[in-house]
Amino acid sequence: MYDPNRDFEKNLMIKASWYYYMEDMTQQAIANQLGISRIRVIKLLEKARQTGVIQFHISAAFDNRHILEKELMEKYQLKDCYIVPTNPDTAGTNDTIAKAASIYIANHITDTCYINFGYGGTTLKTIEYLTKDLETSVFFVSLTGGVGYYLPNSGSDLFHTKLYLIPSPLIMSSREMAEAIQEESSVKEVSNMIQLASMTIVGIGAMDNSSTILKTSILNPNDFLLLNMKGAVGDIICHFIDKDGNLVDTDIDSRLVSVPLSTLNQLENVIGVAAGKHKVTAIHSALMGNYLDILITDESTAQLLCHA
């Protein structure tokens, strides 16, 4: 059975070993690259030697994934990439990716950490898994309105941590109402916290029936038809983008209560969490728009992205 914790540890071990033995990086440089301590790098290298990962070559199965990660990082100018095995049950893909993302993020959390999060099912699953074993104070800040409507009841109790939610619907009835609500002090208070975050978690939506924004009836099929006609291939924090990552300018976007893409573009350590053949075009467009610093996906999606 696939163990995401063990897989993440092996993935870190492979990366540290590759950088140290194949690219002649110093232990401190590897620590900086992976966002971990130098002591942990030393322990990873020692464990790699003890377990036989380091011989005359790196184990082929992990080597292939590392090569894919490196190709995606170079192609899309990413800071990091974490690829996990593809779940043979496509219905479980989001769950697999959420588990992987929670492990990755947990290994990069610092004390009293602020983490932004966007709208979407995979993002919510990531936070659920992440908060199960937290040993430090973490504050989650929503990037959009409407989050409270798809959280379970007593969301704060569920997460055993502090949630800062934008107190508004996701989409207002008019541009004027959207602009007015974003001037409210309670909304501004949450929005001002966004710049404090050390990480940001976002999902990437596809233009199909699996989209959370469609399943929750915030948009309807006619809205999706219009967006398709305008050239939309997917969305990120509910802003719809075209194949090159450019914002699709519609009345829907003008009524949206969500951090602008220009702000997302300026944040550090934006982590995209998405996988699936149906999402490849949307993920590619998000990467082309330079909205992501880190991508967490599965092997089959990564292979398709390498050839996109």
Image: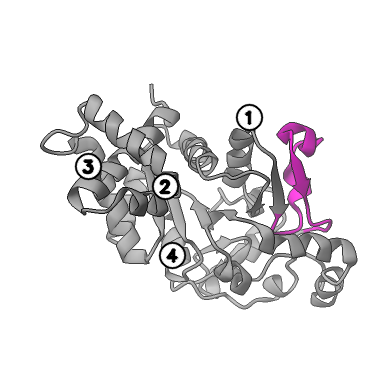
Disc 1, SS? helix
Residue denoted by label 3: 63
Residue at the image point whose x is 44% and y is 53% from the top: 295
In the rendered structure, which amino acid carries the disc numbered 2? Answer: Thr
Is disc 4 surrounded by few (<14), some (14 to 19) or many (20+) residues within 10 Å?
many
Q: Position of residue 137 (x, y in %)?
A: 69, 40
Residue denoted by label 4: 287
Quote the CA–CA distance across marks 1 and 2: 21 Å
**Colouring method of the image:** one colour
In the rendered structure, which amino acid carries the disc numbered 3? Answer: Asp
Q: Position of residue 60 (x, y in %)?
A: 18, 37
Quote the CA–CA distance across marks 4 and 1: 30 Å
Residue at the image point whose x is 71% and y is 54% from the top: 142
Disc 4, SS? helix
Please identify, in this view, whether the residue under mark 4 or under mark 1 is nearer the observer: 1
Quote the CA–CA distance across marks 3 and 4: 24 Å
Q: Position of residue 260 (x, y in %)?
A: 65, 71
Quote the CA–CA distance across marks 3 and 2: 16 Å
Residue at the image point whose x is 57% and y is 75% from the top: 248
In the rendered structure, which amino acid carries the disc numbered 1? Answer: Lys
Residue denoted by label 2: 297
Disc 3, SS? helix
Q: Nearer the viewer, residue 214 or 34?
A: 34
Residue denoted by label 1: 132
Residues at circles 3 and 4 in contact by the CB criterion of under 8 Å: no
Q: Is residue 87 visible?
A: no
Residues at circles 1 and 2 in contact by the CB criterion of under 8 Å: no
Residue at the image point whose x is 76% and y is 58% from the top: 145
Provide the residue span drawn in magenta.
142-169
Counting residues from the start of the chain, the first of labels 3 and 4 encountered is 3
Task: Indicate whether 239 appears above or below 209.
Answer: below
